[in-house]
Amino acid sequence: MKYSLPSTSKLLDKAFTFGVATASFQIEGASESRLPCIWDTFCATAGKVRDGSNGDVACNHYNLWQQDVELISSLGVDAYRLSISWPRVMHKDGSLNPQGVNFYIGLLDALNAKGIKPFVTLYHWDLPQHLEDNGGWLNRETAYLFRDYADKITQALGDRVYSYATFNEPFCSSYLGYEVGIHAPGLAKKSYGRQAAHHILLAHGLAMPVLQKNSPHSLNGIVLNFTPAYPLTDSEADNTAAKLADEYFNQWYIKPLFDGAYPDSFALLSDEDKPVIHDGDFDIMQAPLDFLGVNFYTRTVYQAAAGKPFAEVDMLDAPKTDMGWEIYPQAFTDLLVSLHEKYALPPVYITENGAAMPDKLLNGVVNDQDRIGYYQMHLTAVHNAIEQGVNIDGYFAWSLMDNFEWAEGYLKRFGIVYVDYATQQRTIKNSGIAFKTLIGSR
Ligand code: GBH
């Protein structure tokens, strides 16, 4: 029950930050004490969430937060990444809701008292429903409302926060939520996905100066997810397919932030699918970042196909997690090195990495050897990227504990801590014990 890294690895420096991550809708529950959000509505729509579940109770973290802080502390981590529920901290009229704000103040104070650095994400997908009713991320106004939310909440939380991220994974909110509809709000139109992405990146850019002003000492930035695209063969056609997919799913969400432009394949969009872009938007998006958060889980393989720019290939014989995602750690190293080569990156934090596995609690033990294997390979992949010159300052396991896995409901377990939903009993899995041992060995 141990992860091993070369003794000289930067990951073993005390200055390297190890943490665990969660998100508000996935763990908090207590939906009755906040405004409805788009995920409440999505969960209530038949056929959207695989087990028909919702976030009403989840891990009941809203009520069990004190014991959860003890749990986090018992893992010996340096940091805890959480997200703020916008519908919990703001009323419909745009004023702060003190009850919701006080929940986070209590939580942040308890973390700081234990010496655990809070990494706070302002938006991890739970848009207030009343804003969706007004067009959500298709409405440019939402970007300005996000800036206002960011302004008020960061003033209220003061200097309790070590790091702020504006958004978690603009790709997921825009593409999964507005372009293919497998996430809330469940809309499915190409032009919607591209417009939502533009408004989210704009909202990010509008909020960055506000964070820098209200919280000048915290590390302020954004969290992006990447699913590196590989060609099935080294044919030119497959290489082109992979390149186009990479631009569409990955570079689309980072290039505007560093280069002030969408990838070249923007030109391939029909006029109808192109987002409305105002003069100056790219200048706003390019606000300097103190850090970049990178979330990595898997890669995707592509080949050329008739009538479309790329076709995804299912790697049938490859090892996979319980999500059906291929386990391919080399892609993690390749990704980090290529981002470093392409962009003038600030310090990078791995803000999510982990795996769903079919865990079983037996006599008080979860012997999740496959997850331990996944973490071993991916920690090594991060180590290798550092050796190749990438500036990486931290690593967060996704997730602290099993939780509401979006469209999969409670069927998939990503935690390094097992949650028995019937009793809300938490049990540290063997992967979590190994994480604790690694951190403690420094
Ligand atoms: C993260 O999203 C989320 O931030 C987090 O809330 C969530 O619980 C966690 O991951 C686990 O899902 O879909 O087969 O094409 C990650 C989302 C995962 C989206 C990989 C793209 C590509 C594989 N990404 N996925 S596939």
Image (spheres, helix red, strand yellow):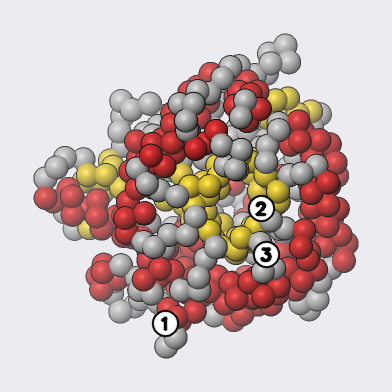
Tell me where residue 147 appears, x and y as whole percent: 64, 76
Q: CA distance from mark 1 to mark 2?
A: 31 Å
Which amino acid type is shown beneath numbered disc 3?
Answer: His
Q: Is residue 177 visible?
A: no
- Report the disc number at residue 217: 3
Which amino acid type is shown beneath numbered disc 1?
Answer: Ile
* Quadrant, the N terminus: top right
User: Can you tell which of label 1 and label 2 is closer to the viewer?
Assistant: 2
- Report the disc number at residue 377: none
Q: Earlier in the sequence, mark 1 or mark 3?
A: 3
Which residue matches tag 2? Answer: 119
Rendered residue at 72%/11% (across/down)? 363
Which residue matches tag 1? Answer: 277
Q: Residue furthest top?
A: 363
Q: Earlier in the sequence, mark 2 or mark 3?
A: 2
The residue lying toward the viewer, choosing from 223 and 47, is 223
User: Can you tell which of label 1 and label 3 is closer to the viewer?
Assistant: 3
Tell me where residue 123 appears, x and y as whole percent: 63, 61
